[in-house]
Amino acid sequence: MNTEVSTSMKTEKEWEPRIIAYCCNWCSYAGADLAGTSRIQYPTNARIVRVNCTGRLSPEFVLAALNMGADGVLVSGCHPGDCHYTSGNLKARARWALMETAIEQAGVDPRRVRLQWASASEAQIFADGVKAIVEQVRELGPIRSEWK
Amino acid sequence: MTEKKQAALIVGGGVAGMQAALDIASQGFKVYLVERTPSIGGRMAQIDKTFPTLDCSACILTPKLSEVAHHKNITLLTYSEVGTVTGKSGDFRVRVRRKARFVKEDLCAGCGDCAAECPVEIPNEFDMNLGFRKAIYVGFPQATPNVYTVDKENCIDCGRCLKVCQRNAIDLEMKDKTMDLHVGAIIVATGFELFDVSQYPRLGYGHYANVIHAMEFERIINAAGPTHGHLVRLSDGKKPHSIGFIQCVGARDVQKGVPYCSRVCCMYSIKNAVMALEHYPDAEVWVYYADIRAFGKGFEEFYEMAKKRFGVKFVRGRVAEVMEGKNTGNLVVKVEDTESSKVRLIEHDMVVISPGVIPSEGMHTMATKMGIEQTDDGYVQIDHSFFGPILTKVPGVFVCGCADGPKDIPDSVSAGSAAAMKATIILSKGGV
Amino acid sequence: MSDAKEEPRIGVFVCHCGHNIAGTVNVAAVAEMARHLPHVAFATDEMFMCSDAGQTLIKEKIKELNLNRVVVASCSPRMHEPTFRRVVEEADVNRYLFDQVNLREHVSWCHSREPEKATEKAKDLVRMSVARAAKLEYLPIKSVDVIPKTLVVGGGIAGLRASLDIAERGFDVILVEKDSQLGGNVAKWTHLFPSDESGAQVIGPLIHDVKKHKRIKILVNSKVSEFDGYIGNFGVTIKNQSTGKAHRYEVGTVIVSTGFEPFKPVGYYGYGTSPDIVTLAELQEMEPGKQLLKSSDGKPVKKIVFIGCVGSREPGKKGHEHCSRHCCSATAKAAGDLRDRVDEALVLYQDIRTYGKGHEEFHRLARQKHVIYSKFPQDGHPEVEVKNGKIKLRWFDVLGGVELQFEPDLLVLASAMIPPVDMDETAKMFSLTRSGDGFFNPEHIKLAPLTTHTAGVMIAGAAQAAKNASESVIDASGAAAKAVGLMAQGKVEIESTVSHVLPDICSSCHTCVTACPYGAIAMDEEHDPPVAIVTEAKCKGCGTCAAACPSSAIVMYHSTDEQILTMVEAYLCATPGLQGGGSV
Ligand SMILES: Cc1cc2nc3c(=O)[nH]c(=O)nc-3n(C[C@H](O)[C@H](O)[C@H](O)COP(=O)(O)OP(=O)(O)OC[C@H]3O[C@@H](n4cnc5c(N)ncnc54)[C@H](O)[C@@H]3O)c2cc1C
Ligand SMILES: Cc1cc2nc3c(=O)[nH]c(=O)nc-3n(C[C@H](O)[C@H](O)[C@H](O)COP(=O)(O)OP(=O)(O)OC[C@H]3O[C@@H](n4cnc5c(N)ncnc54)[C@H](O)[C@@H]3O)c2cc1C
Ligand code: SF4
Ligand code: SF4
Ligand code: FES
């Protein structure tokens, strides 16, 4: 097991961004599935955590992930208006600004978090979203440098 | 639900027949599913990936196979054929011939000890004869039921399998049996056959080792197939760097008696072209076509993806001839590019012919037994395009999937459900 | 039955999926890693986990090793979670104690060029899932009765067929049509392919049978205005558009067959600038007299041109990328039929997609009658100029390699099938998603074309994708079979993944009551002080309430804060004690 630990905690030089991607089951998780079936290639850095709806995600989930050492967090849901539960994503969006402020106050660059909409048929948009956050985080460097 | 369960008979265990079986059984009626080969699954079990989203076929089909096999209302009669049919809607008497498989279905656990022992090796028809199987065999790993079958034509009666089978499941003396069924409705789901592309000698199939047809390609590219999924040429096992797909062979050709469009060839070739590029991203892949018929849900989008993202090259024109180069095993395709009106010669190291789809073997015999009509092309004649697209001319007998004409999987599945609906209307009215 | 309090004993099964996963991910290494994780009693890798052999293996290992949690690392749970849930249940492990890792769609297929990193990701995902599995809890399996009545929305050929089939099978139907008449689009067509009846001849008898059937209640001029409930027990309010009167019904299943609209191609080929430029749909409304007369000056049409793919097959243009499937055949039919009444008939096309039974034949017939077909390039569509009432057409004929010109008296545009204007409203009403073509997404594009992700709601006909009437009829019967399947069983299992308010922690703030989009939470006034209480039957499990609750008093079954965060932790803090469930 210890070998496992070392693979995920590489030295600074080999540092690879670690991203938590919360995806809603109905659109974005399915979009990620479609990216797979369409063989669209994107960076391996994100680990998808499936939730029913982005509405499920209170800011704590994002903060906790950053706190535990995620270099970035992606939240991906259905387009506004398309939420499987009618409006969960609108609530997620409404909370988002608040959360960004909270992150900033904790001294973390809010560019480490990304909220995006990707429908079940938007495999490319999903993949691009992952690419975007990985590149963004790569630019910002490891999160350890930021926490106060 | 009525006490005495009404029953339906389904002939053909491809994806259409399986869907029909499930939708009837889920209403509480009994289903007998008669399949001629040792396993259900039909053509879908043979293909590698599926358009338009490239799911692997086995992955989406396998659970369906086990769902059918385990459903308490479905009785699987594999390796069986319909003998005689009498009676009328609501009250059919059907005699089914259960061919001796020389292995007792209830005892065999599918362990394969027997096959390991069997000394006879013959080409496996499931792999389009490119791979090998023993004389006691299952066609493919997910065969359902997972029971071995002895192919008596090739068996040398050495009895070695008998000795190793720990469950004493093998009986080389087994005889064919008949079974009489009383059913209210019948669904014909006998699927299709491939057009024999050697009828076009100019295309070189059967003469040149590196000219294969699409189903062979599907097997070659399949991980469980004869080459373990390595896309190689049959002549020398080399990676092909350039592949040409030839469309509409044995389809849309009045002269060859197949005036109709086979509906799936455009799409399966685009799929296979994409899969070839998946394997070898720097390969060159060309498709020679007359029209690209990407008409189903998500098909046109898939076609665009093949062009734009994968770089499949599409050339409009009928291929005049395929020639083999000296010693190289390479092939030269002579095509009149109708968009530039030029005759072009293009070299490939592998050519894949897309065969059209024709009615399943024995369709005429079966149609006669049931009294159903056939079209000029040999498919089951439907009653009416709008009033009864799944009805045949005989009340109580329905048709779905490719038995009444070429269809892709979604259309076959939808038709399977529709046939189930029609059959259960009869079953629910009692009768039997 | 597994006891939730029991120490977790997890079995991990890593699937090769033939080459699909094993070709990229080192599955043996993943299983080896899993073997050493906390609570893991068994880990292995297998060729096909979903095959009979794989399923049997799971069941045997559960029995043999007394496993009480199962993790399968294979394909997307969106496909096979139901399969594996059934498998573990057959071995007496509660379905909610199963977790699936997506190594195929989310790893091997999208990282096929980076096998090492893919393997690393696979290991992480399995570790996360094992951590979650350890925290999973037993949930009861609930089933509900299915109301033996189906709501059919849309009275086109698909809706009519579905209604009739269900009624003939012995169940009640409510058929809602927003128009004042039943029949949908087919009713408008003068000559249908592939037979030769008029739409009215086909639709007439169907409407007659539907009207006559005592099990079918028809509501025209009406639309669904409210929809709630869950599979087997939907509540639906149907409002009459003209009287404004609304009525509530209870149904067990729903079939949405709201069809399509012919696209009005404003901005294409001069459409709208001359009365002699019409769509194929509008052509059907023109007087079918002996001679076709121009709308502009009433003179006979001598030269007619059809253009295909108008508003279809436009890469990059949202909602117009798809092929509309019916138009090639409809055009061939119309051109062939009209050929005798005009001097010249041309069809400009990109590909001729007369794929259906008998379609190729009447396409050939049209050519035999000297309808001229000319192919134009995908990137160079014909150009239309309207001057002094004259239509001038210029295009490049690909096959002849020449630029051509023509002055038709009538230009017919075979325009796309697009979703009806209120598609969005319908989608929201029934929580359906739409695919790129704008039509509804089926549950699975190949193997489940008629069901949707809203359990109990089916789709049929052109509402699912562009298709012809015969295909719509087949869909309709198929969707009817799905609805009847549910009703005939009489009972259906529903998800237990609902929310629950912990009364002791609830601070009576009402936040969740307003947050819930389904009105599933109310204040329990019996309780002192009043606390929030969830009506489980109404809850869909979105979790919005749990996110909103300021007191963290709401537990989402199967998606608890702990179950989610333990995965995050297992990925990020991969130290033994923190790997989820490990006792430190
Ligand atoms: C090369 C190729 C690739 C394809 N790829 C795709 C794809 O990617 N996506 C897609 O959607 N579609 C694809 N298709 C089409 C797909 O195979 C068919 O849609 C599907 O198999 C039709 O199912 P079916 O049940 O009607 O027929 P079948 O699959 O042919 O099944 C019919 C069954 O009936 C049995 N049978 C026949 N006669 C009798 C009899 N007399 N008595 C008892 N049993 C009998 C047969 O043994 C068989 O098991 C492809 C087709 C080909 C040829
Ligand atoms: C120009 C043209 C020619 C064609 N010719 C042929 C042909 O020759 N042969 C052939 O097979 N096919 C043909 N088609 C295709 C055929 O019209 C369709 O396949 C068929 O109409 C689909 O039937 P449907 O019932 O699914 O949808 P529709 O016919 O569109 O019916 C849908 C019904 O639902 C109603 N509705 C919609 N939304 C709501 C709502 N929210 N609430 C209540 N009701 C609602 C609508 O008012 C309508 O009555 C043609 C199509 C076009 C455009
Ligand atoms: S059916 Fe024919 S005309 Fe219609 S969009 Fe498809 S290809 Fe174009
Ligand atoms: S999870 Fe909460 S907000 Fe969502 S439906 Fe259930 S009770 Fe309402
Ligand atoms: S279900 Fe996707 S955001 Fe709500």
Image (spheres, coloured by chain):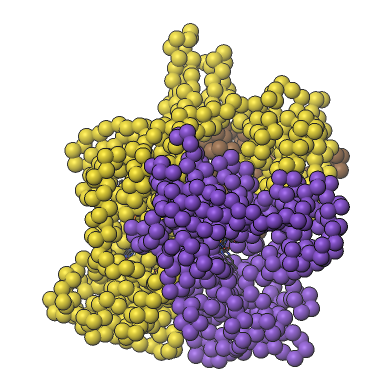
Residue A78: where, in percent of width, then height?
Answer: 50, 45
Q: Which chain is yellow?
A: C
Q: Which chain is brown?
A: A
Point 28% across, 82% down: residue: C345
Closer to the camera in the image, A11 or B145: B145
- Name the outermost residue toward the top: C528
Point 46% across, 12% down: residue: C530
Closer to the camera in the image, C84 or B130: B130
Residue C374: where, in percent of width, then height?
Answer: 38, 83
Point 41% across, 75% down: residue: C360
Closer to the camera in the image, C437 or B147: B147
Q: Is residue A128 above or below residue C571?
A: below
The image quadrant that residue C320 belongs to is bottom left
Left or right: where does residue C211 sit relative to residue C425?
left
Point 73% across, 49% down: residue: B104
Q: Colour of chain B?
A: purple
**Which corner quadrant holds the C terminus of chain B?**
top left
Is residue B270 at all visible to an observer of this figure? no
Is residue C526 at all visible to an observer of this figure? yes
Q: Is residue C15 above or below residue C520?
A: below
Residue B101: where, in percent of width, then height?
Answer: 70, 56
Left or right: where does residue C314 sit relative to residue C10?
left
The image quadrant that residue B107 belongs to is top right
Residue C95: where, in percent of width, then height?
Answer: 64, 33
Q: Is residue C275 above or below residue A83?
A: below
